[in-house]
Amino acid sequence: MKREYSKHETDYIEKYQNEGYTDNYLFEDGCLMDTDTKYKYQPDEIYIVAQHRYEGMSDPDDMSILYIIETKDQRKGTHLLGYGPTADLDEAEFFKDIPKSNYTKNSDINELT
């Protein structure tokens, strides 16, 4: 992970959008929903290309994980998940249910092709 983008989620979101990860996903009804198509993905339909963790500069309880996602139907986008004391536990469980084989070891945008 390059330090120049490590301070703010929006910096990474912009970089990934420039690489074609333009879809947005919301957690709704126990599924990850594509905001454009409204399709609701189950954990086994999600592939995590990369993930970046953030901790708030002024408040350490302000924590999040930016997930870079590809889906079983070849859509690509991002999802920002809050974690820590204020996390949505159902949403966190959804990401825990994604099979480990659906996670790549790639964590640097510069390694994407």
Image: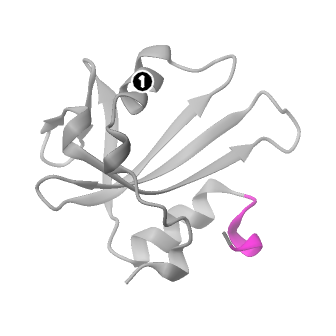
On the rendered image, what quadrant is the N terminus found in?
Answer: bottom right
**Residue ID at (47%, 25%):** 92
Q: 87 left or right of 57? A: left
- Residue at (50%, 18%) from the top-left corner? 88
Residue 2, above or below 91:
below
Residue sticking out furthest to the front = 101
Answer above or below: position of 49 versus 110. above
Residue situated furthest right in the rendering: 58
On the image, numbered disc 1 is attached to which residue? 91
Magenta residues, as a range?
2-7
- Examine the rendered structure and indicate whether residue 107 appears above or below residue 40: below
Q: Is residue 9 above or below residue 95?
A: below
**Residue 88 located left or right of residue 53:** left
Residue 50 lies, in percent from the top left, at 48, 59
Say whether residue 51 is left or right of residue 19.
right
Give percent across and percent down for residue 106: 49, 67
Q: Residues within 10 Å of mark 1 (few under 14, many from 20)?
A: many
Is residue 97 a member of the stretch shown in magenta? Answer: no
Q: Position of residue 67 (x, y in %)?
A: 46, 49
The answer to which quarter of the image holds residue 60 is top right
Badge 1 element: helix
Colouring method of the image? one colour
| Residue 55, picture quadrant | top right
Q: Quadrant of the C terminus?
A: bottom left
**Residue name at image x 42 percent, y 21 percent:** 93
Q: Image check: 104 left or right of 25?
A: right
Amino acid tagged 1: Glu
x and y percentages locating residue 23 in the rendered image: 29, 56
